[in-house]
Image (spheres, rainbow, N blue to C red):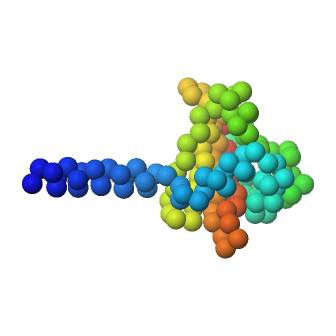
Amino acid sequence: MQLSTLAIALLVSASAGAADRCPRDFYPFNARFEAEVEFQVSRTRLPLPYSFPDREDDELRTRQLQLARSDLEKYPRYPSRDDQARMRAERSFSSSGPKQCTVHFELPDSDMYSIDFKFQRHRSGWYLTEIEDYSL
């Protein structure tokens, strides 16, 4: 009896952790996405929704833009592994379904850098579909 209770507890624990992770096929895609700028551009759905905090009249508001290909160089780009190490950024993955994955970057104990890159899987693979920047 105790063994089956332990097995059920382990299964529940494993499935709860899996809900926070991205689908398995996302991780090889992500490795290439962070390593190759040309691949990033080819795997970005345009126009790309980009939201960020904006201080207007001493009030903090969220501003939203639709980025075209020509805008991509002006706004935050997905950090390479070298950039992540240099900034000491922490990276985490989360998913709200089998065709979605969010990669979150932040600087520990700081509001200076906190950003979500949202991806969706389409027929031809994974694509960056939105950026939510919370950096202050």
Q: Point out the residue furthest to the bottom here.
A: 123
Instruction: Give the answer, above or below, for where 97 lies relative to 9.
Output: below
Query: Where is residue 5 drawn, in percent x and y?
Result: 16, 53
Residue sitting at 66 percent across and 51 percent down?
30
Left/right of residue 90 with respect to residue 15 in the rendered view: right
In front of the other: 59 or 43: 43
Question: Which image quarter is the C terminus in?
Answer: top right
Residue sitting at 50 percent across and 59 percent down?
96
Question: Which image quarter is the N terminus in?
Answer: bottom left
Query: Where is residue 108 drawn, in percent x and y?
Result: 57, 28
Number of callouts = 0
Q: Can residue 120 be seen in this view?
A: yes
Query: Where is residue 35 drawn, in percent x and y?
Result: 75, 45
Left/right of residue 69 with respect to residue 101 in the rendered view: right
Left/right of residue 111 with respect to residue 49 in the rendered view: left
Q: Is residue 56 visible?
A: no
In front of the other: 21 or 48: 21
Query: Where is residue 69 drawn, in percent x and y?
Result: 86, 57
Residue sitting at 70 percent across and 61 percent down?
127
Instruction: Give the answer, above or below, for where 38 lies relative to 106.
Output: below
Q: Point out the residue furthest to the front here.
A: 3
Q: Point out the residue furthest to the right here.
A: 70
Residue sitting at 54 percent across and 57 percent down?
24
